[in-house]
Image (tube, rainbow, N blue to C red):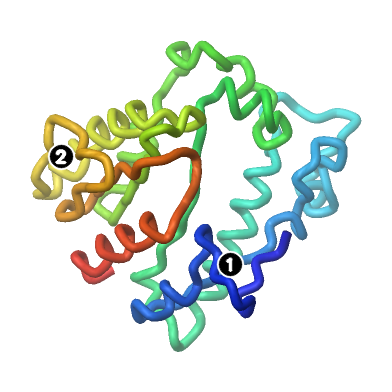
Amino acid sequence: SLIDIEQETEQEYWPAEQIVQSGRSAVTFYASALQPDDAAQYPGPLAKLFGLSADALPADAWGTLDIWAFGMSCVVDLLVKHPGIDPARISVGKHGETVGSITAAFPHWFCKNYQKYAWKEETLPFDQHQLVACVAPRLCYITSGSEDRWSDPDAEWNGAKSASCAWELFGDAPLPSQPPANDSGYLTGRIGYHRRTGGHDITRWDWAMFLRFLDFHNG
């Protein structure tokens, strides 16, 4: 469903008022307008502009998430031209899950090749921390739910800890050796992390911690 920022009851997942009250802008777009979240409707009109066809879809062809990411990049292209937006302080959010669970539930989100690694992630030619490390030295913030079996909080922490060596090359202190206690986090380095009690979600508390992280780094 569409996110209504004018509704009387504020949403936990997208607390626009909380974000705006922190002195920032809150921007979103309806991703399903670019590509419906439905395997039967892939590829949609935008995907077809890139030469994708349901009759002959290559194993490495874009999935739905790629179309949505392309749409997000177009939104950022517009924001950097807006006189009220500092292009150096734009943050983009996402969330993730294990390969096996996410490809089983949403196979159309990814290229077909990705499904080869379902439940055997150890055979991937690279791991998530290597992708996270590519963000350095820019700000990066990773969140976990202590009971989130979709995303695996321990794996998320290990990814953050392993990736943090990239920020060390730019003078940051390493992340501590152990993850934070539930409902706390590490905010002082340019790669931050917190763990919330609960499951697969984004809550007002998650947003509050992320905004504190940005405040600490003038982000």
Cα gap from disc 1 to disc 2, whole angstroms: 31 Å
Type of amino acid at the residue the image marks with label 1: Thr
Q: Which residue is mark 1?
A: 28
Residue 211 on image: x %, y %:
32, 65
Q: Earlier in the sequence, mark 1 or mark 2?
A: 1
* Residue 164, image x, y percentages: 21, 39
Residue occupying image coordinates x 52% and y 67%: 76
For the point 46% across and 38% down, the residue is: 199
Q: Specify few, some or many for label 1: CA neighbours under 10 Å numbering under 14, 14-19, or 20 or more.
A: few
Residue 117: image x %, image y %? 56, 16
Q: Is residue 99 left or right of residue 184?
A: right
* Residue indicated by mark 2: 175
Callout 2 environment at 10 Å: few (<14), some (14 to 19), or many (20+)? many
Q: Classify the position of the C terminus by image quarter.
A: bottom left
Q: Residue 172: x percent and y percent?
A: 11, 48
Location of the N terminus by quadrant is bottom right
Q: As drawn, is 215 to the left or to the right of 90?
A: left
Q: Is residue 34 left or right of residue 20?
A: right
Q: Secondary structure at mark 1?
A: loop
Residue 203: which quarter of the image? bottom left
Residue at image coords 47%, 77%: 17
Task: Let me know if residue 82 appears in the view.
Answer: yes
Residue 91 picture quarter = bottom left
As drawn, the residue found furthest toward the right would be 55
Kind of residue indicated by mark 2: Leu
